[in-house]
Image (cartoon, coloured by chain):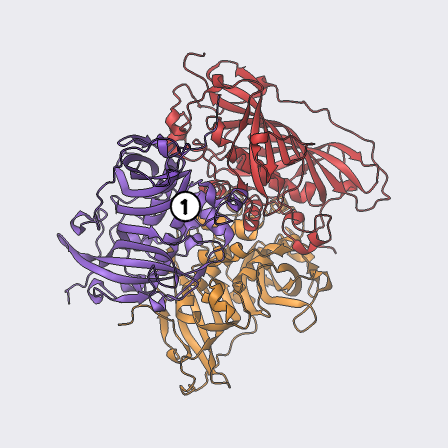
Chain colours: A orange, B purple, C red
Amino acid sequence: MQKSSRGRFFEHFSIGETLHHPGSRTIGAADATLYLALFGGRFPLQLSAAAAQSCGLAGAPIDELLLFHIVFGKTVADVSFNAVANLGYADCRWLRPVFPGDTIAAESQVIGLRSNETGKTGIVYVRTTGRNQQGEAVIEFVRWVMVAKADPAHPAPIAVVPELPARVDPARLLVPAGLDLSGWDHRLTGQKLCWEDYAVGERIDHIEGVTIAESEHRLATRLFQNNARAHFDAVLQRASRFGRPLVYGGHIISLARALSFNGLGNAVLLAAINAGRHVAPAFPGDTVYCWSEVVDMAKLPGRADLGALRLLLVAVKDAAGSAFPRAGGDAAVLLELDVWVLMPRRGRPA
Amino acid sequence: MQKSSRGRFFEHFSIGETLHHPGSRTIGAADATLYLALFGGRFPLQLSAAAAQSCGLAGAPIDELLLFHIVFGKTVADVSFNAVANLGYADCRWLRPVFPGDTIAAESQVIGLRSNETGKTGIVYVRTTGRNQQGEAVIEFVRWVMVAKADPAHPAPIAVVPELPARVDPARLLVPAGLDLSGWDHRLTGQKLCWEDYAVGERIDHIEGVTIAESEHRLATRLFQNNARAHFDAVLQRASRFGRPLVYGGHIISLARALSFNGLGNAVLLAAINAGRHVAPAFPGDTVYCWSEVVDMAKLPGRADLGALRLLLVAVKDAAGSAFPRAGGDAAVLLELDVWVLMPRRGRPA
Amino acid sequence: MQKSSRGRFFEHFSIGETLHHPGSRTIGAADATLYLALFGGRFPLQLSAAAAQSCGLAGAPIDELLLFHIVFGKTVADVSFNAVANLGYADCRWLRPVFPGDTIAAESQVIGLRSNETGKTGIVYVRTTGRNQQGEAVIEFVRWVMVAKADPAHPAPIAVVPELPARVDPARLLVPAGLDLSGWDHRLTGQKLCWEDYAVGERIDHIEGVTIAESEHRLATRLFQNNARAHFDAVLQRASRFGRPLVYGGHIISLARALSFNGLGNAVLLAAINAGRHVAPAFPGDTVYCWSEVVDMAKLPGRADLGALRLLLVAVKDAAGSAFPRAGGDAAVLLELDVWVLMPRRGRPA
């Protein structure tokens, strides 16, 4: 009897099935601290109990991306253990803040399947939900991955490709209960900019760069309990087209968000990921820079204290963000991530 | 007056003496989190308060091997600062679970001494006990190490070699107070296998591999307060037969245990180490795989909810576990560890 | 409108201005744990709640240097983002212990400015104060850094160079409220030496060495929220005279303090930094050793339980401390740090 698992291959997924990802995990203050040491965040609500309380929260919530990665990590053994590539994200919303001590579990529903022309791989679409110990949904997102087939001769299923929104409608964005940015203290970030100070089309170079060290991306990826082999097994990866372990794509997302503090420091919370795409793989030794473009702005119903800014975050490798490179150009773009962030508005809106 | 210490050499040990290892250390939830980031464990009781409580525990206990390493680390300055090799372990039992907030101290008794023929080194056997802040023993184990002599001319002591059990008698295994696996929920691990599903002689390839990064083994070793110079000082190690720092052997033990989740996910607790041997040293860059053999099975008196499985865990370097290599063969076996684990039994035994 | 910041250059500082460094940060038990994993400290009060309570404290305080680095880190974006070199420290005192859960903020006053002859850089002196959530000062120190000018043609300000004490007067040293070392238990450190056992002029080789790994110094530097680009951006640093990222100087301070345990284990608390100087930069791969000289000894008013020892800690690169090298000699001295430490006195002073 086979006791260990090589994970699911493309032909093992069925449309509509629900995957109850094994295990729950209690997220503690230490997760937040280690996340800080790995990514160097400076956004204040997630780092200072005093700052969070001054904005109406009970304490510092777990960073939104740390939660995302932990929920994502729970799906790996079932969804992407045999993934060839992590293709994209859509319709991700944070539904309820998570605080140290909460225990998080995750489940995914298979919402799309499409065999590739080569017959060797297929694309699996899942909608994943993370829940706290009360069973309340705290995050949901769709992602799709290219997964190897165990048997290339296995017949292709009828293709089902879900229709995904190009963006999360701002009316669907959720603000944590109790959050009130009406008395926002700019000393929390040292940046005086409010929602009204940004304009659609504006581009921001976030200036700073971070070189990825080998241990860091693996500590992070394990912290998220993401056991995808491509990140950990150098022997296995020698036989791959990359020749060496890959950095978990979510690592780049977190670096980009942390770098964006310089220029977007008052974008205090992520509310949604509209779309996301890993344009190229990253490796230890790469230096990551980031720039952003303001894509849209939205007031939120009933909220005079804060507004939503839709941003395209672009992470680039070994090249400054000051040239604002996009995928398809010469520069090695790693990531394009389209998000909604929440930002304080002026007391008297302009 | 000499203020600093070069540690104890072989001739400084006496049969029967007790070494009260300096200092106690409060183990917190952060130790568990950092341990997760270093080793990537997925066993649920140690990671989820909700999972632990559903099995009758007050909360998530500190991982058994994290406790082992912290107690081991406390002994290094007194026992193995000048160790040439960490030879073996025996008769290790976990006596009582440790929870975040507990403060741990350690003491060792010298139970064996034998000079080597070369006269340059000798073997020291100690029985180490870790205690919590109430003075209750939480773990005990025997280990033996080869220690350098300060003065090769020092006369050899009368050899005393302790008789050690080949295995811990299963009647001596202790189950944490309150633990009840009778309602075991397989969704905690995603693995449906119970104690009855394993058979003596069965071998399990744990499939996944992990490449050791330089920082990781040192972060771990410092977390355990193990200050053996061979792990930290590259200049000193250039003069050694290895030419570079060694990975702490316990690092391999923890990697092997974490890898064994894939196939032994319901082996929720370690109860004993019967024997252990570091077959070869490991270095940063090595990729570690693991396989297991079921050596024995035991019911425990008065327990219908769980049984004990005796396993030989074999960690191998740069070679898959699917060939089930053993020490002495061609493959670079790093570790052979003989343990008792606890696993839920079926409601109605098969 | 420029949204991101390239930091302050020399001409942006004015004598007397106060910089309110953005953001506060809650320091948790996890910071202490990660700090342990990064530096391997063994001083007991900071690691064991039981040890701290046996000496009259409410619990284990946050390590003095961890606090120093976190407060220092808060100043980087405002003071030293464009620093060419971190020149020195003086008049640093710990004013009140910090415990897990405290939230720390920082402010700095510009107390000195002096343009360099080249006109390309200038020296900025700041006095920095860290405060807890009650607004109480917990640490203060002076540091001075060489900062680039944005415009070399900018006229030099009138030079103001603050008079700094060569040492902190021992009458100004503060002992944490409640601390009582009169019943000091030598088993907490395994070292029997008291304040009376040391003599002015005595030199101590701390024996052990630690090789710096790339990830470690960056995890530490991010934990401190120090975002100075020279530590993180390998592309930027290729154009510098060093060709690669530098290790944050404070990393060497913490390594030296941790190494000094072997010989100064009963120096349980740092009370002041009299002066400090980074003699040479450090890089990943360097192996750090440390030796100390006893420079002065002081009884403290009204305290029979403890005394102060003034030490010069010297960190050296790739060369044992047993030769007691000093800056200016052949050996690669990295750091000279002049500190006051607190140490138990004998019940009946010798």
Q: Relative to residue B232, is residue C69 drawn left or right?
A: right
Q: Relative to residue A154, is residue A201 drawn left or right?
A: right
Classify residue C322 by image quadrant: top right
Q: Relative to residue C189, is residue A55 drawn left or right?
A: right
Vertical position of residue A23 compared to residue B57: above or below: below
Quarter of the picture containing the C terminus of chain A is: bottom right
- Does residue C139 show up? no
Q: Nearer the viewer, residue B279 or C10?
A: B279
How many marks overall?
A: 1
**For the view shown, which residue lies furthest in the left direction?**
B302
Q: Amino acid at mark 1?
A: Asp
Q: Position of residue A328 (x, y in %)?
A: 67, 74
- Does residue C224 show up? yes
Vertical position of residue A150 compared to residue C237: above or below: below
Residue at 56% in and 71% down: A167
Query: Neighbour class for label 1 at 10 Å: few (<14), some, many (≥20)?
Result: many
What residue did someone put label 1 on?
A: B31
Residue at 25% in and 55% down: B341
Q: Relative to residue A299, is residue C26 drawn left or right?
A: left
Q: Position of residue C4 (x, y in %)?
A: 69, 53
Q: Nearer the viewer, residue C19 or A315?
A: A315
Q: Position of residue A279 (x, y in %)?
A: 60, 70
Classify residue A148 by image quadrant: bottom left
Residue at 50% in and 23% down: C342
Q: Nearer the viewer, residue A130 or A207?
A: A207
Q: Position of residue B315 (x, y in %)?
A: 37, 59
Question: Numbered disc 1: what chain?
Answer: B
Quarter of the picture containing the N terminus of chain A is: bottom left
Vertical position of residue B6 compared to residue A314: above or below: above
Classify residue B114 by image quadrant: top left
